[in-house]
Image (cartoon, rainbow, N blue to C red):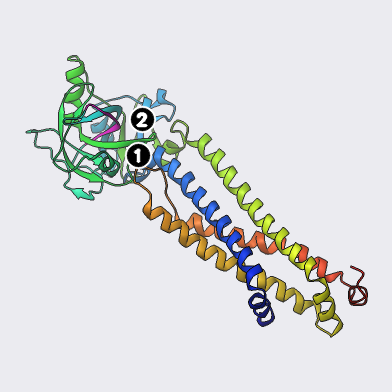
Amino acid sequence: MKLAWKELKHSKAKYLLIESIIILMIFMVIFLSGLANGLARAVSASIENADAKHYVISNDAENLIGTSSLPTDVLKQVSSMTTDNVTNLDIQRTSLTADGNDKKLDVTYFAIDPNGFLSPHITQGKAMSNSGTEYNIVLNDSFNDDSIAVGDVVEDSSSGIKMTVAGFTRDEMYGHSPVGFISTETYSAINIKLNPSFSEKYKAIAIQGSDIDNIRITGASVVDKDTIVDNLPGYQAEQLTINMILWVLVVISAAILGVFFYVITIQKLKQFGILKAIGIRMSELTSMIIAQVLILALFGVVIGNFLAFGMASMLPSSMPFHLEIPIVIIISVVFIVITLFTSLLSIRKVAKIDPIIIIGGNE
């Protein structure tokens, strides 16, 4: 380690250039992982965030919660068959307009019981009420970018029903659309305005726990949250593509660094030959090379991660970007391991050095 550190300090310019490349590469990989997770969250965040482990959906929906349709009496049936809390959920994609602005804003309604466990965490304002005196809504904070604030009035573009913005929540997305939480009563009022003969139905019944063994509903089945998420339109295909690109990039980046270290090793063949000639053991040279690679990789990963998290804190909330610390740690460790593995090329080259030939000038 001491010899490796002396070499790094002696050739500062050369190794700083390599360090900058490591930083840029790990930053690029971590940033791409944030985009991959962000796109995944843009599809599924509101389902993943919900405090529900299972959902009852209709059999003909084929695990697609958006196409499920259940009679309202299923809620009572499920409630009588489990000791866990249950609540209803409706999902509808539409658009809103801010008061005094004709621009349509994409939104997905999550119609819930305001007193149920699906109510979102409020970051601004207050939770929606269920008083019936006025319609209100809790919006994802990405609507702040459209100059919508707590207390503003927004209008459902289809029905013309006006709703007061009670508060904001964070990281609530569904199908690449920001979510607006409304009460089941508000949802019914919107649909009755559009269709006076509207008959209320639920998309799903959410179950908070895992007491599902006794649930038997004709025409419906219990599905766990992970299955619901995996079957959201576009989720699996999108993630498979992006993650494949991500891990290929990790391998390529580490391999490129291995080539850099190999080239540097070739440039120092005479020095290694002299070190061998004066009695330095191959194990010591191996330790020096690995130590150099490890120091550069560790510093690069730490600085690259710092830059990625710093960049994430400055991105607008509307941008699909989400860094998950466990995934960042895995990527960082894999990056370091592959970089160390590629350094074996350099070690193999040094092991083949014949001091007499090298010092004699025949490289």
| Quadrant where the N terminus is found in the figure | bottom right
Identify the mark at residue 285; answer none if there is no mark.
none
Q: Residue at x 27, y 40 (%)?
A: 143
Left or right position of 247 against 233: right
How far across and how far down the image is residue 236, in percent? 51, 36
Left or right position of 305 against 244: left
19 versus 31 height, above or below: below
85 versus 133 height, above or below: below
Residues at circles 2 and 1 in contact by the CB criterion of under 8 Å: no
Q: Residue at x 34, y 29 (%)?
A: 217
Say if the magenta span includes residue 26.
Answer: no
Examine the rendering and report whether any part of residue 147 can be seen.
yes
Pick the front one: 361 or 156: 361
Pick the front one: 24 or 284: 24
Left or right position of 66 against 143: right
Pick the front one: 180 or 132: 180
Q: Main secondary structure of the magenta part?
A: strand
* Residue picked out by circle 2: 57
98 versus 288 height, above or below: above
Residue type at mark 1 is Met
Disc 2 on helix, strand or loop? strand
* Residue picked out by circle 1: 173
343 versus 360 height, above or below: above
Give whichever of discs 2 and 1 has the lower sequence position.
2
